[in-house]
Image: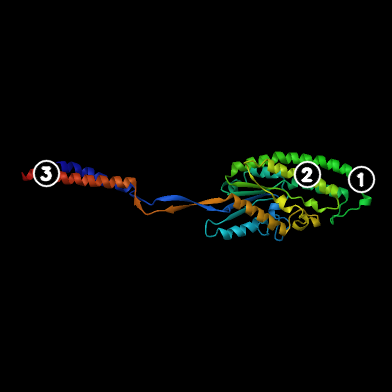
Amino acid sequence: MIIRKLLPICAAAVMSLPSIKMTEIPEKEVVHNIEVPPKMVFLGDSIAAGYGLEGYTSDDNYNCRSYSNILKEKYSDELKDECGHEMINKAVSGATSQDLIDLLKSGKLDSDLKDSDAVVVSIGGNDLLGIMLGLLDKLGVGESGSFDSGGLNILAAASAFLSMDSDVNAALDGFDANIKVISDELSKRTDGTVYIQTLYDPLEYFTNFSMVTDFSSEKIGRFNDIIKSNAADSYTVIDVAADFKGKAGSLTNISNFDIHPNQEGHELIAQEVDSAFRETGFTYTTIEYGEKRLTAEGRKVIAGGIAGMGLLFVSGTVLFVRKKK
């Protein structure tokens, strides 16, 4: 009688086995330390876009030897046997700091920024350099960097400086407010490290016109102070200006009245960005699998089965003994 009662229970237990996961392959996350970012994003203006370099076009930032592309090539090789590498360059030639804010708030960069490890920004040059180049034009400075001092109207020059001073100061005040917004907007969209570049002074090239070089040094100096003073824990400063100081003639195209870095300039910026990355350090995660093993549910089923078989055996033995008697 006891065996008859136990058999349906055992049968039901066996029938339930297909719904129980008996085995599993254990997995664990393994964090790997590396020096450079698996995914980096470049944002900002024409400096980051690579304007003026061979292969650059207004709708393609990937076929010139800009500092972003130099690093892309370098890191793709360095990380090929680890996690691989991805570089995205969404810099826009002519963009101001307000343009970058508008682009960030539009949501168009969200997917690129979401899983980025490093975001490098060059922005603000268009906020004030255009105004300052206008000063050179008003003063009659030619593309060779020369001007006719005998034909210079001192009163007109003084008036131009006063007007320009007011315009540039207003632009700097606007940039001070905008860099805070840019930092906040980026922090909402990425957990990666944000880097913001300082601005080199291309107008230092005009050494024969101290009125221009002094003015430029003061204003761009304040611009870079704004970047540094707002960094705090929000972003890391890459001090491009320090590396370019005294070298505008050899690292930019200013001799042709073009403020942008030449090939040598981009190579130097690439070195600076690379150093900043390696000082930060990065990680990537992989999943490693162990040997197949019983699940907790599987161990319970087997233990229960053994116990049931034991009970059946004992019950059968007792009945056998009783019948024998």
Residue drawn at point x = 21 percent, y = 47 percent: 309
- Residue type, mark 2 in image: Lys
Determine the secondary structure under disc 1.
helix
Q: Of the residues under marks 3 and 2, which one precedes in the sequence?
A: 2
Image quadrant where one finds the N terminus:
top left
Regarding residue 98, the answer to whether it shows in the image is no
Image quadrant where one finds the C terminus:
top left
Residue 64 % position (x, y): 68, 59
Residue 90 % position (x, y): 65, 51
Q: Of the residues under marks 1 and 3, which one precedes in the sequence?
A: 1
Q: Is residue 92 above or below residue 105?
A: below
- Give left or right: position of 105 versus 6: right
- Residue type, mark 1 in image: Ile
Pointer 1 with pointer 2, Cβ within 8 A? no
Q: Which residue is mark 2?
A: 219
Q: Which residue is mark 3?
A: 319
